[in-house]
Image (spheres, rainbow, N blue to C red):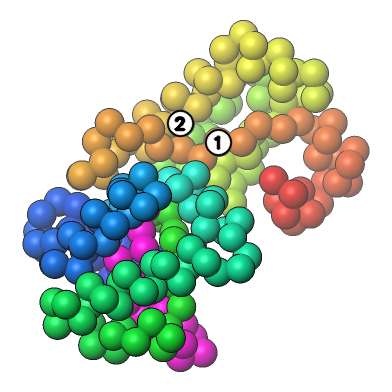
Amino acid sequence: MFLEDKDIQKVLDTINGRTPEDEVLLDMKAFFKEEFDINILDYICDRTKDGLLRLKIMVWDVKDTVMFLCCPDRELENKIRDRFSKACRDHGLNSEYFDPKCYFSVVSDFRSDVEKILMTDDTIKKIDEVLRGHPEVMSHRYSIPTVFVFYKTDKDIDTNYENGLSDKIREEISGVLGSVAGFEGRTLGDVRFSSLETFEGRYKGNFHGFWLDH
């Protein structure tokens, strides 16, 4: 879930200490760590385009969102909303969220937003140069912030994973992206490998159809 620029800046300001963590965030950090063993970064209160009140809990990586997406009965969401509303009431913050029945909540990864802001036109040109330096790469495409790298055949995907080429390409792209203050040391770069054999054979060169499955 890509954030608006102001919300990205809010999370970055919290991470870097420019905005102090409020009592609600401290409570929710403790709750998520104890209940789910997940470290959260920040929370965002906003509304959807339809005007629905929403709570976004920001985590670093998409892997920390999976358990919530796989809980269709909303049991986990209800736990989150109950705890968030209690924290808001206890500390007198975010009064619109005092009643957990008045909004919905989502757990969203922030890594994709960090990668998105790093994926400038200049960065894309540098990634193009990196990939052109590997003759095994037949083609590549972007669905920002994801880079899709195509080898010639499906067999090449396995071969280049085993010989370390794919890891090398991933590391080189991560090096081009660099880092954002507060997330130094984190590996960035959503790089996915496929083949022209699959892209042109199974999907007839239709990137939209390919993207939906990958």
Q: For residue 191, which numbered disc appears in the image? A: 1
Label 2 crowd bin: few (<14), some (14–19), many (20+), radius 10 Å: many
The answer to whether residue 184 is above or below residue 100 is above
- Which quadrant of the view contains residue 46? bottom left
Q: Residue at x 27, y 31 (%)?
A: 185
Q: Residue at x 29, y 57 (%)?
A: 31
Residue 42 located left or right of residue 56: left
Q: Residue at x 22, y 78 (%)?
A: 88
Residue 132 located left or right of residue 8: right
Where is residue 11 drawn, in percent x and y?
Answer: 25, 60
Q: How many marks?
A: 2
Residue type highlighted by circle 2: Ile
Q: Residue at x 21, y 62 (%)?
A: 27
Per the image, the residue denoted by label 2 is 173
- Which quadrant of the view contains residue 202? top right
Earlier sequence position, callout 1 versus callout 2:
2
Residue 211 located left or right of residue 82: right
Of residues 39 and 161, the one drawn nearer to the viewer in this rendering: 39
Give the magenta range.
Answer: 43-59
Q: Was residue 55 drawn as part of the magenta stretch in this picture?
A: yes
Predominant SS of the magenta segment: strand
Q: Was residue 191 drawn as part of the magenta stretch in this picture?
A: no
Of residues 15 and 156, the one drawn nearer to the viewer in this rendering: 15
Where is residue 43 drawn, in percent x and y?
Answer: 30, 66
Q: Secondary structure at mark 1?
A: strand
Of residues 50 and 155, the one drawn nearer to the viewer in this rendering: 50
Q: Looking at the image, is mark 1 or mark 2 nearer the viewer?
A: 1
Of residues 45 and 74, the one drawn nearer to the viewer in this rendering: 74
The answer to whether residue 57 is above or below residue 113 is below
Are circles 1 and 2 on residues that touch, CB within 8 Å?
yes
Residue type highlighted by circle 1: Val
